[in-house]
Amino acid sequence: MNCLRRARGHTAVTIIAALLLPLASPAAESDDQAAAWDQSIDVQLPPPTRTITLKPRTDAAEFTDRHGLDGARITPLGRSAGSLIEVPMDEEAWALAEQQLCGGGDVMSCGTAACQRIQFAASANPGGELTAEAIEARIVRNPPERVATADPSEAGGSCQGSPLVPPLEESAAAGTGQTPNLDLGLLDSGASRSGNAQGTTEARDAGTPDSSGATGSASISNSDSAVAANAADGTRASSTDAAASAEAELAGAEATSPAAPASKQSFAFDVSQAFNAVGGLDLGSDALPADTSDYTLVIGAGCSEVEIPLSAIEPARLPGIVLALVDATNVTPVANTYGLTVVRQIGLATTGENLVVYLTTQNVFTVIAAMALDARVTGAQPERVFETTAEFGTQTLQPVSSYSDPFAAMNYAPASTGALALHPEAAGSGQLIAVIDTGVDVAHPDLAGRVREPVDTSTFGYGPETHGTAVAGIIAAEADNAIGSYGVAPAAEILPIKACHPKSEGGLRARCTTSSLVQALDVAMTEGASIINMSLAGPPDDLLTRYVNLALDQDRLVVAGAGNGGAHAKPGFPAAIPGVLAVTAVDVANSLYANANRGSYIDIAAPGVDIVSTVPSGQYPPLSGTSMAAAHVSGIAALLRELGPLMSATEVGLVLKSNTRDLGETGTDENYGRGLVDACKAAAAATADAVSCSTGGTHASTL
Amino acid sequence: MNRRGPALALASALAWALALLTLAGVSQGAAPNDPFASSAGSWSQDYADQWALDSLRVYSDAASTFGSGQAEPSTIVAVIDTGVDYTHQDLAAARLWRNPREEDNGYDDDGNGFIDDLIGWNFVEGNNNPWDHSGHGTHIAGIIAACTDNGLGIAGVDGNARIMPLKVANFTGQARSSAVAAAIYYAVDQGARVINLSLGSELVTELEIAAAEYAADKDVLIVVSAGNRGLSTANSGYASLPGVLVVGASDPSGGRAGFSNFGDRLAVLAPGVEVLSLRAEDTDFVGLSDPLDYDEGAAFVGDKDAYYRASGTSFSAAMVSGLASRLLANRPTLDAAAVRRILEQSAIDVGEPGVDQLSGYGRVDYVRALAAAPEDFIHARLTGVELSLADETIWLAIEGRADAQRFASATLSVRAAPGSLPEPDPAAEKEAKKKKKKQGDKTSDPSPFEWQPYGEPISGPVSDGVLANLDLDTLTQLTGGASAWELKLIVADENGSTREARLSMALPAQALPGLEPEVEPEAGP
């Protein structure tokens, strides 16, 4: 994704997006949803892209390291033409960099990337081509996780039959089959900031039929001068002079004008309208993508763009599903009262509660509001959606050494966390780690023999899957068998609980729900796991919180990935539940993983970028995400629990948090929490220095 | 969707009806079985849904076989654009290039610096998934290589081509110039023989110029779109890149589309109005350019809205990329220059006779291209005029190209541009005749609106440069004092074949006193 390039000291435009939900008729719903969507996010647009062309046979990675070019992207330019470094940089920094870097040596040429653009068809307005500086926002459906490929051996290629890769699994949530990729018009700010509907109607004179009171307003406003800009397409919005001037100002601030002040820009847009605007669909607010996990909000400014997963802005839920705690005897009567269909019942052994998954055709929030007053119902809430937090690695140049020994070069993590050095003392034996995830490949040679009978709570059926297998591998892959990678706690035992189901075959993206996670926690507790790893994130959820707290009360350590929503995301749960160890990810250079969530709830950092682990295919693709980082911490926690069997889970958590290597700002910060996990320091603290090891020592000696 | 300007709209019904009559003469004997390849009126228009295939004559009897099987070798066509919806029902993975030296394993197996570049690359986000969030790239890919003869949807211009999707533009259709340059290098190194480049703006950086030179060096043809503003900008932006083939748009009547940019680097026209192709999932890109008169979804066509119609020179370029791809599949030994020459030389003249600024060599035609001999050519092109002052005489350096495989001769002639002179005053006319009679001049003076030889015949071929240096006085005398002219170049070869080129020009009002360096070439309506 690489959406947010961080650059030092630049003055970028900051955009605050407020998502306004249409006011639909049932009060409960509109209150609930509007509250959820009416929020601001800060978006920092990257400065212009500067280009440095290096001469052939110049080591570009070394060059960027040597010159501290943060956020640089390296692209080879042909077999004989050198390589291209692209780095976002504001005028001031670039002026300096040009002086230092562009005077010859390895550098062939320097410049600033121009914005080229697709020329759209002629129109009434011959200048109808997009202006380079315009800002546009859209919600787009995420692409398939893996590309379609034909068999490379097939010479000609046949077109008979269906495409090799089926279209994305239909989002159950959107309920429309057709989901739009469209622009969110940006309008006069006054209307949109106050969230009223008038602005929209004016704006969309020739638009689609508005559904239930769609407030299609969107605006750019400049907080200093209160000017408004229209959409990038230049036509959707009112054509006030102010619009033009704001656009110009945006352009200036974003691009090159040194005089342009770094001003706060805010814009608001209406998602309902956005989802209406393609295909003539008349969607009610219910048809908004309740499961937002398949969509991304993209903000484009010129040829730069910023991407924010929609689920990082608005929590996902499954439409039409109501979760309720109802005694077995009352399940059917309750269903009859509210006109519900029972989808399934989950008996929860730890509490004796009966969790019922109901399906309703009515508005979920209306039903829940009614149930709140019903004595037969202990609790009712929507079925929320959680997602695993990993993606395939994105590095574009591979380490030089990887040809000869790929996994030694890539598997930096156990050494950098000190876990490796602890292995002579502890390898996690006697620890049962519940991996609440997608299915773990129980037959994987790296894991075989140390995996308990797997459990499926996802209702999709158990199977070996990528994410769960990778997480289990990071925690506990066999150390001494020369098969690719090795785990942090290679003697620990894994309890695989499949609560999440992959969205596509072989993919990392997987969806879990409140009910599948609650059931999984129940299983983890009844099976006696000492550590519960949840490499997934989602919205706050009462029921999930209750069961997580139950596990914490039972002296089980719960470790969770902080989330991969990026800097603008809301806190990821269960990581943000107090008591849960919230883990963020760093790369081999201990820099923060670009897509990591930020926030005060983040406890600790661990390696999570381009991590090599086991996957069912027998290959070892580099993976990135807070999922990978959480798994590292779970593994280290297993080592500590082995070393200090008398310590409580809370104490283990505290020891881990207070024995880190500080990263980022001094002390605790919202990016790295307390800093990089340090197994050595923690072990020393836990055992009153009975164990000593050093982190800088041997590397991958067990391979 | 009506993306056409008013002028074009006026031209519509009659002209297109005429076009249908003309096209009816083209046999559909070899037509593929894709339904849209033989249907008409799917959006209530009065011409064929895939009229472009008829116009190009790719599936006429005279064209060679087509097929989606292994009959012909495949050409790799790189589409440097917004990406591709590779899940589209009519663009199976089989139509995509597959990197033969790369596996899906997280490593850079072929050592080219790109990990898992299985089908291309996403230069926007730096990953291997060139997914199309705009729809523009998918439309282009479909024009070139939609699954053909599969009983579904549309036919591509070259159903055997393999598309290499290189995503450089984001969902707003904008691309970093550095990404475009890197994509060109990638395409060349990975074996593309044709690169479709349907984007660009006025500012071109060194990076793209170097990349275009690299492509030219390695014998890769870059096809670029002229642009859609109906202006003389076809010499700027990517049209100015070295070695590229610049394509403008023709309409269903076979004429130039009003929005098609023009200029002296415009090479050919190809269908670019209401072009039917694939719709990428969840996209509707026409709305991006001018949503005022566009209702969302109005351009959707077919079941499941899987197809899409749009106008623009982007799609004309794709037509030519497809033709080039087919030519190369048919005759793999052709080099890029030969493909370009064949497409130009075999084009059907459009508009004013001869090669001109508005329509270049004319409208491309596959049957004629197949029949063309790669070495056989006559180039005639007038690109501009430069003024200079010497010996108190104003000289015009006529620039252009007059060349042929067996060059015989080239002549320039001139006439006053229509409307450039006041209607002759009958009295003055009479007086002039009288005067002539008195002087014993029996030959009647030719009208300034008739062609008259201008200067001596050009003795040898000129491949790109000054054809003749002529003085302005002669010109004004020849044309009765006009200050706007049409210039004509006729190049003949030893076989007696000729090709003609035209250029309209006018003296800018301020040119004479201050002697502005250039005469503005003026182009048409």
Image (cartoon, coloured by chain):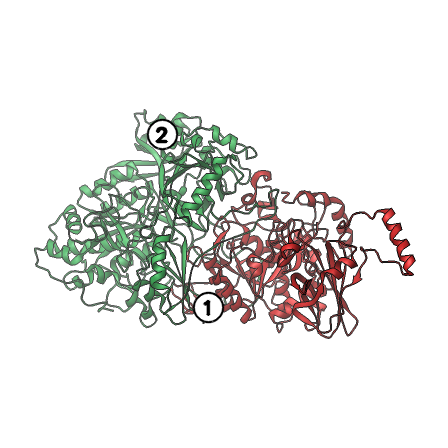
Callout 2 and callout 1 share a chain:
yes
Rendering coords of residue A575 (x, y %): 26, 45
Indicate the chain on which mark 1 is placed. A
Residue B268, placed above or below residue A216? below
Badge 2 local density, few (<14 within 10 Å), some, or many (20+)? many
Indicate the colour of chain B: red
Look at the picture and state if A104 lies above or below B419: below
The answer to whether one can see residue B71 in this image is no
Percent of width and height locating residue B466: 66, 67
Left or right relative to B132: residue A595: left
Residue A368 is marked as 2
Q: Secondary structure at mark 2?
A: helix
| Label 1: which secondary element | loop
Give the amino acid at mark 1: Gly
Distance Cα–Cα, label 2 vs label 1: 60 Å
Q: Colour of chain A?
A: green
Nearer mark to the viewer, of 2 and 1: 1
Who is closer to the viewer here, B190 or A238? A238
Q: Quadrant of the N terminus of chain B?
A: top right
